[in-house]
Image (tube, grey):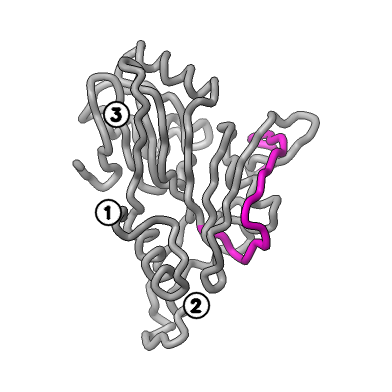
Amino acid sequence: MKKNNDYSVIYSDDDIVVFNKRSGLLIAADRYDPDAPRLDVVAEKEFGKLFAVHRIDKDTSGLVIYAKNAEAHKSLSKQFEERSVEKTYHCLVNGHPTWDNLKVSLPLQPDGDDRHRTVVNKRFGKPSKTDFENLGNCGPFSWIIAHPHTGRTHQIRAHLQTTGFPIVCDPLYSGNQHPVLLSDFKRKYNGDTLNERPLLNRLALHAYSISINHPKTNERMSFNAPYPRDMEAVRKQLAKLFKVNPIKDSDSNNEED
């Protein structure tokens, strides 16, 4: 798997390319920050012109698919529009939900307030649906698996906020910006808490898997994106201490920053 500082190449052929992107990188042009670093601009130096077929948030890490030609773009765009694409996200939330599984169907309006957040709006919002699975408590946190059935901006983040369990270090939807520190959940921490480096200090949301039909062969294809280094460090520590693990260690292939 080829790597650079911005992305890893999960899969590539004549029609599509699948990336595992870092957090903090835009997928396409942003009207609020036109000069911000973009995955498509960076990757086109290696792959030539790319056609965006879906988006994930700038602060989210994980899987992004681009088409390499107009025909593939048309096919993939249709699959996203028809919601035949299956997407799975992993996230760490603050607190302990009492539910094991939860379906949230609340209409969402992107750019609905002065902070450009997505808000629930029953009059002007678009139908939005996300299924959540609670894997269990990990000290002050819980691991959540999210399956969005629609593709609204900030959908998972906005829907989780309505449950009262926002994602760790979410700069828009969580009032708690405290980074993940080992000393916060390891009982016998022997390090210097004054100079401790956070395990993770960005949005704890990762686009982990996606399934599509190949635009040329129609073969069903599934891709997984290994965790980036910061989320992998958190996963390993929480799995060791609390025996709750969103992925099997045998399936984990740690990414390099």
Q: CA distance from mark 3 to mark 2?
A: 39 Å
Residue 223 placement: quadrant: top left
In magenta, the rendered stretch is 92-114
SS type, badge 3: strand
Label of residue 148 in the image: none
Residue 198 visible in this rendered orientation of the protein: no
Residue 76 visible in this rendered orientation of the protein: yes
Q: How far from the left and from the top, in percent, is residue 136? A: 55, 64
Where does label 2 land, which residue?
184
Where does label 1 land, which residue?
253
Tell me if mark 2 has few (under 14), some (14-19) or many (20+) residues whose alpha carbon lies within 10 angstroms of its own: few
Label of residue 17 in the image: 3
Q: CA distance from mark 2 to mark 1?
A: 26 Å
Of label 3 and label 1, which has the lower sequence position? 3
Of label 3 and label 2, which has the lower sequence position? 3
59 or 214, nearer to the observer = 214
Could you tell me if the residues under marks 2 and 1 are in contact, i.e. CB atoms within 8 Å?
no
Q: Is residue 244 above or below residue 174?
A: below
Q: Amino acid at mark 2?
A: Asp
SS type, badge 1: loop
SS type, badge 2: helix
Q: How far from the left and from the top, in percent, is residue 228? A: 34, 54
93 or 193, nearer to the observer = 93
Q: Is residue 135 above or below residue 147?
A: below
Of label 2 and label 1, which has the lower sequence position? 2
Task: Quadrant for the N terminus, please.
Answer: top left
Q: Amino acid at mark 3?
A: Val
